[in-house]
Amino acid sequence: MLTVAALAALLAAAGCGGGSSSSSGPKPSSQIDKTPVTITMWHLWSGEEGKPFEQALKGFEQKYPWITIKQQVQPNTDNDTFDPNLVNAINGGNPPDVAMPFGPDYVGQYCSSGLWEDLAPYMKADNMAIGDFAPAAITYTNVGGHQCALPSLTDAYGLYYNKDLLANAGIAAPPKTMDELMADAKKLTQRNADGSIKVAGFVPLNGWEQIGPGDLANAWGAQWFDSSNTPQFAEDPGWAAALRWQKQLIDFYGYDDITKFYAANVNNEFNPSNAFEKGKVAMMFDGEWRTAFIKRDTPSLNYGTVPFPAASDHPEMYGSGRVGGTIIGIPKGAEHPDQAWLLVKYLASDTSYLVQMANAVGNVPTTEASATSPDLKQPPQFDTFLHVWLNDKSAFAPPTQPSGNGYANLLDTFEQKWQAGKISDSDLQSALQKLDQDVGNQLSQGSAP
């Protein structure tokens, strides 16, 4: 676990992000109204994760005994229904007082359209700033200068590696560059007698476990948009470099072989037959929660974690990665906004709550105090993700747009074609230019997640 001094130094080095905003919405009262009241909250904590959430909420009830929380647990489906249903509730004039989705995919609309209230007045009144969190927090809670959400635990991503497989292959240390990742992946790959893949060194396919569009390109520091919000897939050479790296490794496996391996294992991501946990994959891009899965499913697995490698010509990117997770806010029209703010503030910043939930569900706590708390009990491999969260180049991806993040589906489709060899290397640049145009057109028309 990070020491307090080490983490404090990281935070100081990272600096304090911030954003200002103004709003015509509710303003905080100068005095706390302690009249007994019931507020409603939509969230997704259920099943095994619902139990510690219930327990952690007791701290709020003890701190604010005049406020009763009426929890309305929403279905946690593969296709997000939380956000569309919430938008309908807001537009129908029947919103909850507090909303807590597991991801920020709709935060662009929430902030830019006023569907969620501006929290800036409440934060100012309580001497709270977005700089109290890691710099990456602002990338998925503030859109267009409107601070309509706060983080409450987060995900962070890095590289998992099987220490035994690396040692058997004569690899002394995990890769730090993309060149090393390529070489190690090839060296670690084992094949069956019929030529099929027995152990994959690293699966580079989009959608394998958690790897998505942009995660490879981040190693080259590739930008999604320029300062005028123009797509940069063709203009930033990092995208072409990342795609060519990916295709080179796919070609090493053979597209048919690696897609068969993918199909045989992709449905085991969240069960004890997970390919990494079973030693079928030597290295894997994944989130911090895998440490909890391994502890539960395969505690004897000899593994380590490090930040995802960076391109040799972009060493400054080492240590950064994709982050983002649960957010919390006050929907427009909430009946009890002042009391809702007390719950939002508690879920975003109360050290005891954040540590308790981080220990229970294995997510990254989002404040300095919670990340350095002696009560945070996580395995040493968890430290990697605390560092990624705090890195000043880490960010949520795809970048949040006022009209939503649905534009990223165009990149997904592009990458599927590229992986399958349906776009030739000689046509890559022109295809990326077309992608820029398509994304720009979709954003101008107002896309949705």
Image (cartoon, rainbow, N blue to C red):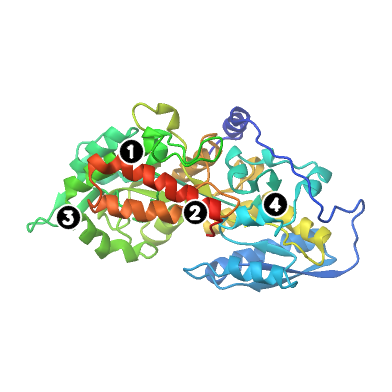
Disc 3 or 4, which lies upstream in sequence? 4
175 over 347 or under it: above or below: above
Along the line of sight, the residue nearer the viewer: 206 or 174: 206
Closer to us: mark 4 or mark 1? 1
Residue 102 spot, x, y in % from top left? 57, 60
Residue type, label 3: Ile
5 over 378 or under it: above or below: above
- In the drawing, what numbered circle is on residue 442? 2
Residue 126 spot, x, y in % from top left? 81, 45
Q: Mark 3 points at which residue?
A: 197
The quarter holding residue 390 reads top right
307 over 33 or under it: above or below: above
Residue type, label 2: Gln
Q: Tell me, yes or no, whether the two marked residues, 3 and 2, touch with CB atoms within 8 Å.
A: no
Disc 2 or 1, which lies upstream in sequence? 1
- The span from disc 3 to disc 1 (Cα, nearest Å) is 27 Å
Q: Which residue is drawn at 72% across and 73% down?
A: 92
Q: Which residue is drawn at 54% across and 60% down?
A: 448
Q: Name the residue under label 1.
A: 240
Disc 4 secondary structure class: loop
Closer to us: mark 2 or mark 1? 2
Residue type, label 4: Cys
